[in-house]
Amino acid sequence: MLVGTHVVDDLYQGAVPALLPFLVAERHYGYAQATGITLAATFLSSILQPGFGVLTDRRRAPWLVGAGLLTAGVGIGLCGLGGGYWTTWFAVALSGVGVAAYHPEAARAARQAAGASAQGMSVFAVGGNAGIAVAPLIAAPILGATGLAGTPLLALPAVVTALVLAAAWRSREPAPARGRAAGDAATDDWRAFGWLTVVVMCRSVAYFGISSFLALLLIHRFGLSKGAASAALTVFTGTGAVGTVLGGRLADRAGRLRAVRTGYVLTVPGLLGLLFAPDPAVAFAAAFVLGLGLYVPFAVHTTLGQEYLPGRIGTASGVTLGLAVSVGGMVAPLLGLVADAYGIRTALALLLVLPLIALAVSTRLPETRVAVARA
């Protein structure tokens, strides 16, 4: 059930990039305005998600799983109903708050179920990947038929899932509140966690830059329809589901850091392939490679964060899945300004430095004792 809730919650993260071509076409937004919508999805989320993590470290709050995904769905459902830019912006921001509320408690539960296995955490993460991947497949046909007025239909999965969760939890015994153990602070490695946060921020900016501009690049460079271009997003995120599972398996067998570095090594040729693709087929192949590269380290980041801060699992999850991840959405409008002024390819070219920085910073990360023991 936990993986299923992750599918639904992250569907609303994936819906935001899928909405951008429709916002550009129907409301004539510029690239900076369109990427500003991406900022809306992540701005409040980036501020609040670590706070939700601290909250769940002090007291378990399983109700946040259902309430968070419901809020995420309602926000996306409302975003197409108001014609004004700021009405849309705040509706998408509401969705981001829901995403922020969901992740720390859900990641804590996944950690408890998976134990020390990075592959176990990758199974939970792949639920989110699947949600992001199917979002364009769901959003594009609905909005293609109804226009932005059809966004309330996108909220239905969240409403149904929240009702199922409410019924399931009502039949369970309430779990006791769990505080932080007194001796946990001595085992927290904040220095390593700080370096890890830099690595995750690099991935975040690269991911949001690619997901914001991939469909738009294919539309404007190759003349693809909005639906066909959105399919490239599905390739990117769908391959990411495979990459997430492979990353967890590699992390358990060869070490966390080898998995992280493998992903960023793959990202560089994938981005070069997208920039210099002579036709849509090569661009789709590049999206495939980028999906592998950016998702192989995805769940491993969270596992590493939880192992660096074993006494603050909620905080570690909130930062790796929240503040650091959401930085990309905050940077996306700046990339939009570059795209407006110099073109989409120039904006994407700026992303090339990020996997190189991530590789360099990863040399400062220590391998965890759990990973060494499993290797």
Image: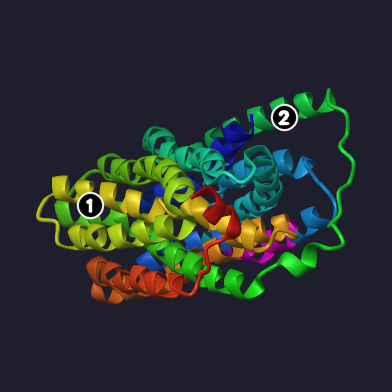
Instruction: Name the one closer to the observer, 75 or 57.
Output: 57
Q: Identify residue for label 1.
A: 286
Q: Is residue 4 left or right of residue 50?
A: left
Q: CA distance from mark 1 to mark 2?
A: 38 Å
Q: Residue at x 38, y 50 (%)?
A: 26
Q: Is residue 27 visible?
A: no
In the rendered image, residue 364, in percent from the top left (x then y), is placed at 48, 75
Q: Is residue 155 magenta?
A: no
Cβ–Cβ under 8 Å for marks 1 and 2: no
In the rendered image, residue 40, in percent from the top left (x then y), is placed at 55, 61
Q: Is residue 44 magenta?
A: yes
- Amino acid carrying label 2: it is Leu
SS type, badge 2: helix
Please rate how many residues cluster around mark 1, counting C-alpha atoms within 10 Å: few if below 14, some from 14 to 19, many from 20.
many
Q: Main secondary structure of the magenta part?
A: helix
Q: Identify residue for label 2.
A: 165
Q: Is residue 302 left or right of residue 140?
A: right
Q: Is residue 66 visible?
A: yes
What stretch of residues is rendered in magenta? Answer: 43-53
